[in-house]
Every structure is written in C-alpha cells, then in structure tokens.
Amino acid sequence: MNIFKIMFPFEGHRSLSNKWWHRLSVVLFFLISAISLIFLVTLFLSSFPENKFNINIKYSLEDFTKDSPKSTVNTIPSFIELEHRIGCLENDDSIRRISLYELEKNVCSSDLEGNLKEVADILYLDNHEFGSVINLQNMLANMLDEDMGKRNCFIRTDFECNSGEIVSYERNIIFYLESFLIPIVIVYILGLVLQIIYFKALIYIIYGKLKNN
C-alpha cells in the first residue's frame, strides 16, 4: 500500500491546487506536524517514564560499594562520577529520579567500622543535632553492632531509598523506540483529525461535495 495514501487518505478536488490558501494550508500542515513531532520527541526524551524494562542497570550503590577498596571512606562521589543516570528502583520496577545533592549527604563504605571516624566527620556536616562528632560516632558504632557488620551505608531515613535500590543505569533501545514511535503515532492521529476537519468540514462548507474529474 502507498505510504503517501496512508498518511494522507483524504483527497481534495484537483482545482484546490490552484488556490493559494490551499497551498498555504498544506505548507502550514507540514510545518505544524514537524514542530509538533520535534516538541513531543524532546518532551518524551526528557520525561518519559523509565522502568526496569527500558533501561540497563549497571550497578546498585550496594554492589558498587562492596566491590570498592576498604580504604575508600565514601563511595558515593565515585558512584556519581560513573557518568550514568542515577535513580531509585521502586517496588513496581519504575525508576524514580533522585537528587544527587541529597544523595551526597549520605555515606557508603565497604569498611564502615574501619573508617568510622571519617564517616562521622562527613555525616556531622548535615547532622549537628547530635551535639558533637563523638556523639554521632558512638551512635553509628551502635548501629553497626546491631547490624553485626552487614551494613555498608548510612542512608538518611528521609531519602526513602536504600543502597540496594539506588542504581546507576543507562537507557536502552526500548526507551528510545518508545520516545520516538509514540510521538509519531500521536502526530499521525492529530494529522488525520486535521485532515478530516479540513477536507470533510471546511472544504465541504466552501464547495459542497466535489468530485475529481
């Protein structure tokens, strides 16, 4: 089937090509369609929902931290420098974007106990309510004892995402297909609506029912 016929199923009377306003309408139609497509593709690329199926997860913060040297006091800066997108993998497999500024207020290390003093110094910058670094360090030590050494991160409770759910990822081909194909379908449907209004309503009002001879 002719692709042009699929895109433009409504034919006008041959005499319309001689009308300046019809030629102008055709030009405006293509111009508006192109602008709409560019706008929608840009919008989808920036805001289309990301999920486990249209991204490739590279690391979780938890795994990245476990694989890091014990001498690294805080793995979060290195995790951010991976230059991948970072988000929180929710229970429904969707990705929630997170603030890197807020992420940097937390600390992860493969040896929290060995780096406890340095970890307390970092966390105290945003947690002065503990009174002193020593008080904070003692509280962190108690938390490590309760977790029996299984903890690799101190994540603020208001962050609402644990180290296993914080992921570094890249968008895959499915995401880009969705971001391009859906706008194309939307623009195509809107184009059909405009053609119906133009040929079946406006032209009919002006000329009545015309036939191509």
Image (spheres, rainbow, N blue to C red):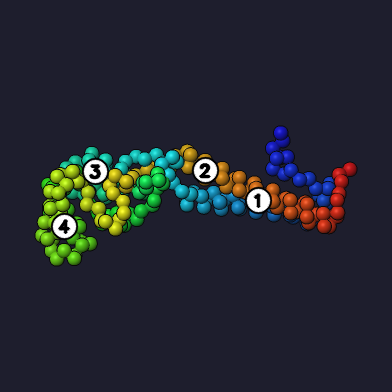
Q: Residue at x 83, y 57 (%)?
A: 206
Alpha carbon separation for disc pair 4 and 2: 45 Å
Q: Quadrant location of the N terminus?
A: top right
Q: Which residue is mark 1?
A: 190
In the image as oriented, which residue stretches furthest toward the top? Answer: 1
Q: Is residue 48 visible?
A: yes
Q: Which residue is mark 4?
A: 121
- Which mark is in front, 4 or 2? 2
Q: Amino acid at mark 3?
A: Thr
Q: Amino acid at mark 4?
A: Asp
Alpha carbon separation for disc pair 3 and 1: 49 Å
Mark 1 neighbour class, 10 Å CA radius: few under 14, some 14 to 19, many 20 or more: some
Left or right for 187, reference 89: right
Q: Secondary structure at mark 1?
A: helix
Q: Secondary structure at mark 3?
A: helix
Q: Position of residue 55 (x, y in %)?
A: 42, 41
Residue 159 tag number: none
Q: Residue at x 14, y 45 (%)?
A: 148
